[in-house]
Image (spheres, rainbow, N blue to C red):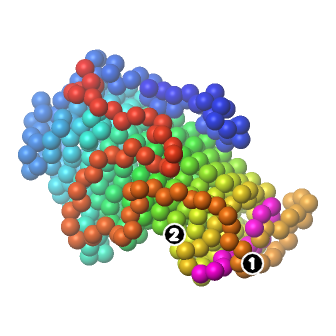
């Protein structure tokens, strides 16, 4: 169902005005209506829930008959998926995953591609649906396989209510999407190997909320181009954290609002680029708890490979109401290091309380960054931006209380055995009620 957030957001926080969603999000027609119009149960197309028989052809046939105005239904049970699915050209369609799809082959790109779809919904009606990737079969040897999901050129959509488990590579890529809602999802996999991003998203007008991630790389990451994102109630539970980038040439990111981020051994902000170009502006990180991230608050414009351009202009960043600690004080707990050719400006740190789990002091590092708070320098206007580098040692412990989530992992999950599929979580930030309740439908569309 499509959701309009303009009035709701105004009630939550007036500061969202410049960074709220630009319009309504979600499908235009609800899944019940689509199911009443036409339902395609994959077992009617030859699918067998025996965990061995490839259900890919059955799903493709069901999609062919119901991808316009209907609902494709995967009933409860374990199904082997040994075909890379390309679900394309859907119009006013829903895909209800109430069973478990198990990767049954060695694919090369992604297990499930949904592309060129409008008014579509991919969800679990019983909140027990899942995709089991058996990624450990690759990752335990330092190898990678295919990604689990890619949503490409999709508009007026939602993805919600299921688990993505143990991917051989990335979990979800949302490529050039618009007017979408992504929520009530669980990602769980090996947490000590990179190139296993959970959510990489670019597009416009997207609401991401109530997500839990355990993986070895980025948690919820904004890529370019992107505008009008609201990202809230995010639980990165052993993960790289919520990042922006990495950013190359032609960067165009604006009006992103993060709210209620909980980081267990993860970073709440890592904005990264190295001599790209373009602009990042109007970003807010509000109400953040960090326990043990390596770089909890970082803007790093010398990260990774030098792209060789003029530098990304970063401006109007706000960090508000942060609490917690990094894992080791040998790394700056606050690091805002901008390009000397295009210094950052209008940076605000307001009520940022970050300490360390290791030692009796923390370091702040700032370079070519202007605004207020921490080690930032002030500037009268953009003509007054000169290059500088400064480091500050802080020995006064801030006074704060940072709640812990009861589900925090303290050790990495095993990397040499299959993952058990856990139930979906019902809490993603201390004291915050999930915005949407989990579904408990019986049958296709709950009819």
Question: Residue 443 is drawn in which quadrant?
Answer: top left
- Local crowd size for mark 2, using a 10 Å CA cut-off: few (<14), some (14–19), many (≥20): many
Mark 2 or mark 1, earlier in chain = 2
Residue at image position (56%, 71%) is 326
Q: Quadrant of the C terminus?
A: top left
SS majority, magenta: strand
| Residue located beneath label 2 in the image | 292
Question: Is 350 situated left or right of 385 in this image?
Answer: left
The circle on residue 436 is: none
Tag 1's secondary structure? strand
User: How far across and down, in percent of the image, does residue 204 sit?
Assistant: 56, 41
- Local crowd size for mark 1, using a 10 Å CA cut-off: few (<14), some (14–19), many (≥20): some
Up-down relation of residue 350 to residue 273 (above or below) = above
Residue at image position (35%, 40%) is 161
Looking at the picture, tell me which residue is in the foreground, 15 or 340. 15
User: How far across and down, in percent of the image, does residue 1 sit?
Assistant: 44, 26
What are the residue bounds of the magenta stretch?
Answer: 359-374
User: How far across and down, in percent of the image, does residue 127 sit?
Assistant: 30, 38
Tag 2's secondary structure? strand
Looking at the picture, tell me which residue is in the foreground, 250 or 299. 299
- Marks 2/1: CA distance? 20 Å
Up-down relation of residue 304 to residue 72 (above or below) = below
Residue at image position (11%, 42%) is 49
Question: Is 377 situated left or right of 138 in this image?
Answer: right
| Residue located beneath label 1 in the image | 392
């Amino acid at each position: 169902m499509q959701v309009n957030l303009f009035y709701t957001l105004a009630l939550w926080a007036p500061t969202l005005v410049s960074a709220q969603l630009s319009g309504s999000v979600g499908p235009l027609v609800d899944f019940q209506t689509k199911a009443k119009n036409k339902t395609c149960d994959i077992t009617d197309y030859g699918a067998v829930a025996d965990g061995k028989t490839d259900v890919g052809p059955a799903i493709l046939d069901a999609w062919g008959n119901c991808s316009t105005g209907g609902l494709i239904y995967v009933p409860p049970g374990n199904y082997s998926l040994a075909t890379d699915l390309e679900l394309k050209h859907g119009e006013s369609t829903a895909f209800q995953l109430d069973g478990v799809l198990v990767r049954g082959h060695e694919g090369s790109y992604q297990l499930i591609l949904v592309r060129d779809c409008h008014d579509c919904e991919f969800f679990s009606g019983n909140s027990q649906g899942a995709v089991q990737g058996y990624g450990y079969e690759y990752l335990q040897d330092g190898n990678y396989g295919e990604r689990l999901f890619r949503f490409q050129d999709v508009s007026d959509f939602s993805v919600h209510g299921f688990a993505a488990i143990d991917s051989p590579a990335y979990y979800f890529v949302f490529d050039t999407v618009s007017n979408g809602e992504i929520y009530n999802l669980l990602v769980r996999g090996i947490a000590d190997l990179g190139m296993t991003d959970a959510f990489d998203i670019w597009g416009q007008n997207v609401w991401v909320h109530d997500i839990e991630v355990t993986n070895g790389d980025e948690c919820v990451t904004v890529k370019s181009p992107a505008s009008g994102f609201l990202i809230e109630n995010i639980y990165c539970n052993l993960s790289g954290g919520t990042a922006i980038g990495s950013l190359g040439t032609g960067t165009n990111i604006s009006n992103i609002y993060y709210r209620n981020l909980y980081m267990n051994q993860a970073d709440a902000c890592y904005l990264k680029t190295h001599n790209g170009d373009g602009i990042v502006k109007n970003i807010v990180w509000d109400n953040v708890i960090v326990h043990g991230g390596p770089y909890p608050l970082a803007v790093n414009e010398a990260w990774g490979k030098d792209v060789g351009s003029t530098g990304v202009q970063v401006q109007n960043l706000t960090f508000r109401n942060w609490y917690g600690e990094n894992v080791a004080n040998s790394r700056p707990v606050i690091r805002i290091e901008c390009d000397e050719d295009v210094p950052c400006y209008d940076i605000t740190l307001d009520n940022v309380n970050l300490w360390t789990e290791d030692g009796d002091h923390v370091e702040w590092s700032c370079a070519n960054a202007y605004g207020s708070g921490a080690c930032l320098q002030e500037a009268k206007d953009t003509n007054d931006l000169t290059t500088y580098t400064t480091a500050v040692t802080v020995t006064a412990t801030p006074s704060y209380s940072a709640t812990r989530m009861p589900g925090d992992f303290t050790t990495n999950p095993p990397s040499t055995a299959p993952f058990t599929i856990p139930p979906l979580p019902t809490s993603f930030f201390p004291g915050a009620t999930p915005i949407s309740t989990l579904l408990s439908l019986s049958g296709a569309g709950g009819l």
